[in-house]
Amino acid sequence: MRVQALSVNPVDAKSTEGKGIYGRIKDQQPLILGWDVAGTVEAVGAEVTTLQLGDEVFGMINFPGHARAYAEYVAAPATHLVRKPATTSPADAAAATLAALTAWQALVTQANVQAGQRVLVHAAAGGVGHYAVQLAKHLGAYVIGTASATKRDFVLSLGADEVIDYQQQAFEHAIAPVDVVLDSVAGETQLRSLDVLKPGGTLVSILGLTPDTPARAEQRQVQARAMLVDSNEPGMQQVADLLASGALRSHVSLTVPFAELPQALDQILTGRTQGKVVVTL
Ligand SMILES: NC(=O)c1ccc[n+]([C@@H]2O[C@H](COP(=O)([O-])OP(=O)(O)OC[C@H]3O[C@@H](n4cnc5c(N)ncnc54)[C@H](OP(=O)(O)O)[C@@H]3O)[C@@H](O)[C@H]2O)c1
């Protein structure tokens, strides 16, 4: 595919520092980061039946493998790409890939969120969080997000029912028990999150479980599981459908041209990003 836009994630920045998924791809030189793309199909393999030349597509390619998507042209398994809704810009589509798919796989595949349940989304203003709030609302949940004060209105605009300023309040004392927690902070936040779960509730962490979590989860009679988003797991077509229906929107807070890609990584490294950061080609 010819790439029109790509998005940048914390895992990109972590991988440049030898963390993230660097260990999985370090032997495949030359290393080129990037997984999230939107663009146009330029060629298809002989057995591809789902895509045609000229299709506008987007997706998260080959994660957690080596996608080499910081590029003008990218090769991808056809199953990792879906058609871009006509009403979604390439930038908004490129944004709604790894982060949106993570939200889907955490809330739907892992936690099986049901209408009427109460869901706590940490880092609700960030890349994953801002899709997770919208998705949980779409699923019919009552949604509580954590964010700092300046991002409160943004998180409310996504549909959150409550926003807790985690810098001013201990969220575990501020909210009633919940059925599901989406944890993207880990550490103490993860441990304290176990205390706000109803018995039988589920915490899904996208940062791995902290050492004390399994024992505390057992003691509290709740489930705690870690997940890694996967290009081969379901969700990408549903993300496309939700973008098309307007139930899911990308909020891109910074767009830079390809030549300024390091600026996009610098923004991600602040840890304070609102919504997504996109690079256009
Ligand atoms: N396992 C997986 O499959 C998977 C997938 C995607 C992402 N991740 C990981 O999950 C993390 C989040 O990813 P992301 O793309 O959402 O990152 P991001 O967009 O960089 O997240 C930035 C947001 O985090 C908020 N934040 C920071 N510390 C917080 C805290 N203690 N409590 C609440 N909010 C806090 C910030 O809000 P304030 O400025 O208001 O603090 C900011 O809006 C990253 O570490 C990433 O690597 C894992």
Image (cartoon, grey):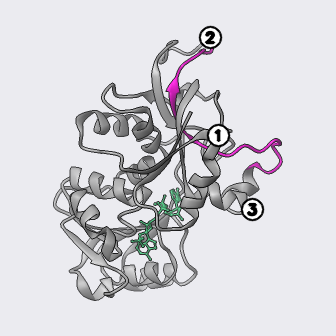
**Residue 118 percent across, percent down from the top left:** 22, 67
Q: Nearer the viewer, residue 109 or 33?
A: 33
The verdict on residue 35 being magenta is: yes
Q: In the image, which residues are magenta?
A: 25-45
- Cα distance between the residues tagged 2 and 3: 37 Å
Residue at the disc numbered 3: 18
**Residue appearing at x 53%, y 84% in the figure:** 212
Q: Earlier in the sequence, mark 2 or mark 3?
A: 3
Is 219 left, or right, of 226 in this rendering? left
**Residue appearing at x 31%, y 79% in the figure:** 165
In the rendered image, the vertical position of residue 239 relative to residue 188, given as above or below:
above
Residue 118 at least partly seen: no
Residue at the disc numbered 2: 46
Residue at the disc numbered 1: 70
In the rendered image, the vertical position of residue 149 relative to residue 8, given as above or below:
below
The verdict on residue 213 being magenta is: no
Q: Earlier in the sequence, mark 3 or mark 1?
A: 3
**Residue appearing at x 20%, y 80% in the figure:** 176
Q: In the rendered structure, which amino acid carries the disc numbered 1?
A: Tyr
Is 65 left, or right, of 257 in this rendering? right
